Image: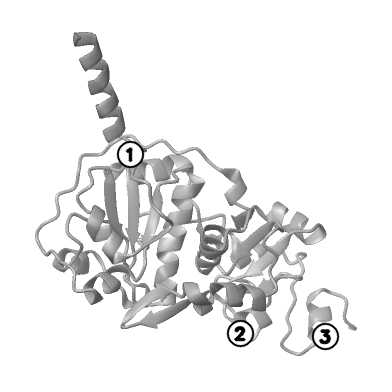
């Protein structure tokens, strides 16, 4: 009898350590229902992006029980070899995540500010980071903190108690992370390149300071990240009702190997999230170096549609002198 009870107790303990099953995008109502789950970590990542706030804003008003880590200040991205915004080494991310008290059994719900389309990209980029580390139990709160407040749910302002650091083990899933060499190979095969930037960047009418030249990677299709979100009652939410039509308008193929990119791999995270996690594309990677890395080498081609075919040929080095 004692052996049976011990075995049953072991099963109970094992079951309690199971991560909470979660969809990629969760509503405030879902989060409120599961807020007391022992294996749930609510991680607020708002930052100055889209005037989303900072640590002091979080301390003044946050979802009860949530933790804070600044997307822009705490090491979720880094500059390396002259390229802005690339993913840090796995060891650095393990220390960052474990330092927040998050372990491999936890389900993590990411909370952006909910103040704009670029702010949503912060959550999408951190979501992708967890996925690259092979941590699948992660989700984004649709509408972010603004959406939580808009629903009239409880907001806390009490001091936050952070758990002790724990060991978080990440295993790199290289299928989600595209290198420059893989982008070059995709151009020559059946790969599908998706530029997540607004149309003026895609056409070459605008240029990010992070990129050495305007234009896009030749052959890329344009799915502007901001077209996938909408302001709903003061909170920016993923416009799931329009996702299919936006993808069809961009003429994207769900069965093709797909690589999303932008200027620094931030806006592209939204496209990656929508294509991979919402639309169900089979094989989607993120080029986190994006145009900041692509334009470092002047020999790599660029397509600039600003002045038609002649401008494109010049960018490819095929125009008249």
* Real-space CA distance between mark 1 and mark 3, rounded to the nearest whole angstrom: 53 Å
Marks 2 and 3 sit apart, C-alpha to C-alpha, by 17 Å
Residue at image x 79%, y 88%? Answer: 308
Q: In the displayed structure, would residue 248 be above or below residue 187?
A: below
Q: Which mark is residue 103?
A: 1
Q: Is residue 142 left or right of residue 299?
A: left
Q: Residue at x 61, y 47 (%)?
A: 175
Between disc 1 and disc 3, the foreground one is 1
Question: Which of the two residues, 321 or 234, is positioned nearer the viewer here?
Answer: 234
146 or 220: nearer the viewer:
146
* Mark 2: few/some/many CA within 10 Å (<14, 14-19, 20+): some
**Label 2 to label 1, Cα distance in Å?**
42 Å
Q: Which residue is painted at 18% across and 47% down in the image? A: 162
Name, please, the residue furthest toward the bottom. Answer: 307
Question: Quick one: quadrant of the N terminus?
Answer: top left
Which labelled disc corresponds to residue 309?
A: 3
Q: In the image, residue 62 lies at what x, y percent?
A: 19, 64
Q: How many marks?
A: 3
* Mark whose residue sits in front, 2 or 1: 1
User: Dot 3 lies on which element?
Assistant: helix
**In the image, 36: left or right of 213?**
left
Q: Earlier in the sequence, mark 1 or mark 3?
A: 1
Give me the residue at 37% from left, 76% from top: 236
Give the image location of residue 168, x and y in percent.
36, 37
Mark carried by residue 200: 2
Q: Is residue 311 left or right of residue 242?
A: right
């Amino acid at each position: 009898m004692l052996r049976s009870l011990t075995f049953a107790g072991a099963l109970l303990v094992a079951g309690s350590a199971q991560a909470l099953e979660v969809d990629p995008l969760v509503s405030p109502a879902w989060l409120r229902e599961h807020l007391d789950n022992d294996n749930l970590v609510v991680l607020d990542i708002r930052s100055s992006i889209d005037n989303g706030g900072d640590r002091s804003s979080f301390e003044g008003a946050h979802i009860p029980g949530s933790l804070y880590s600044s997307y822009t200040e705490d090491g979720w991205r880094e500059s390396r070899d002259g390229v802005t915004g690339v993913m840090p080494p796995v060891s650095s991310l393990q220390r960052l995540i474990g330092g927040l008290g998050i372990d491999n059994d936890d389900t993590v719900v990411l909370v952006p500010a909910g103040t704009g389309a670029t702010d949503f990209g912060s959550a999408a980029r951190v979501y992708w980071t967890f996925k690259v580390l092979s941590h699948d139990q992660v989700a984004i709160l649709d509408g972010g903190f603004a959406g939580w407040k808009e629903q009239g749910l409880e907001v806390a302002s009490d001091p936050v108690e952070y758990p002790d650091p724990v060991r978080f083990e990440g295993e790199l899933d290289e299928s989600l992370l595209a290198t420059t060499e893989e982008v070059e190979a995709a151009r020559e095969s059946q790969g599908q390149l998706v530029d997540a930037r607004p149309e003026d960047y895609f056409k070459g009418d605008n240029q990010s300071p992070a990129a050495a030249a305007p234009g896009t990677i030749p052959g890329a299709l344009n799915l502007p990240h901001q077209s996938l979100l909408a302001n709903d009652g003061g909170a920016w939410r993923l416009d799931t009702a329009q996702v299919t039509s936006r993808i069809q308008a961009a003429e994207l193929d769900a069965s093709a190997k797909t690589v999303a990119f932008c200027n620094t791999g931030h806006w592209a995270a939204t496209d990656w999230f929508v294509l991979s996690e919402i639309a169900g594309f089979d094989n989607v990677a993120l080029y986190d170096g994006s145009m900041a890395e692509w334009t470092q080498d002047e020999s790599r081609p660029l397509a600039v549609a600003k002045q038609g075919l002649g401008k494109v040929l010049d960018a490819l080095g095929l125009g008249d002198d």
